[in-house]
Image (spheres, rainbow, N blue to C red):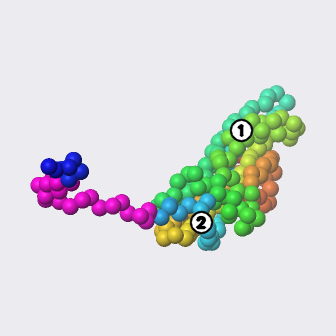
Amino acid sequence: MRGPGRCVALLAAALLAACGGSPAPEPSSSPAPPACTPDTGTVDWGDLTSTPSLLHVVARYLDDDRTTWRDLLDRPFTPEVTGDGTDRTWIPTLARSLGELRNLNLGADASPATELESLHTMLEGSTQRGWVLGYSGTSLVEAGFRVTCGGGAAPVTGTLTTWNSVDAGFIACAEPPATSTFPEVCDYCPKD
């Protein structure tokens, strides 16, 4: 008489032979290396470029008879990161890393979008006659980076584009300044 254990073993052997295969391989004991990110790796920075850029411009005309307002530019800036394997979640870590390295106050989110209201408020207190422009701007900062990690993870390269702190001011169109951080602001002076 045959025991139940021997029957099971013979049945398993017969099934393997009938299928013409061998047992499935054991799963690999070495998992893929984790993805390399700025939070888990070391960030090295390339050269940095900085370009002044206007974000918002408001014009106000004042004389004895009337006050006229025109919103001329409303262009907040949103940081971005490019490169294979990168995504938007990297921006805060990269902005902090580059900011600390270069002693800059870099934006990790979009630049302020309520600047037009602030510029209106600033110009309401001015008694300057004629056209006066209120403006805000920033420096757009761009730098290449390389993130390296241990454990066999492939390094990741890309570019961060963000903004540095916002500056605001105003100019009288009748008396434009000789120099300005944003020389193109005078181009917004109304001609009428």
Picture layout, residue 31 above or below residue 152: above
- What number is the disc on residue 99? none
Q: Quadrant of residue 100?
A: bottom right
Q: Measure the C-alpha gap from mark 2 to mark 1.
A: 36 Å
Viewer-nearest residue: 3 or 128: 3
Residue 95: quarter of image: bottom right
Circle 2 residue: 41
What kind of residue is marked 1?
Answer: Thr
Question: Quick check: can you spot residue 53?
Answer: no
Identified at 74% across, 54% down, the residue is: 165
Residue 164 x/y as whole percent: 71, 56
Residue drawn at (74%, 51%) of the image: 166
Residue furthest front in the image:
1
Q: Nearer the viewer, residue 31 or 60?
A: 31
Q: Amino acid at mark 2?
A: Gly
Q: Position of residue 99 (x, y in %)?
A: 71, 62
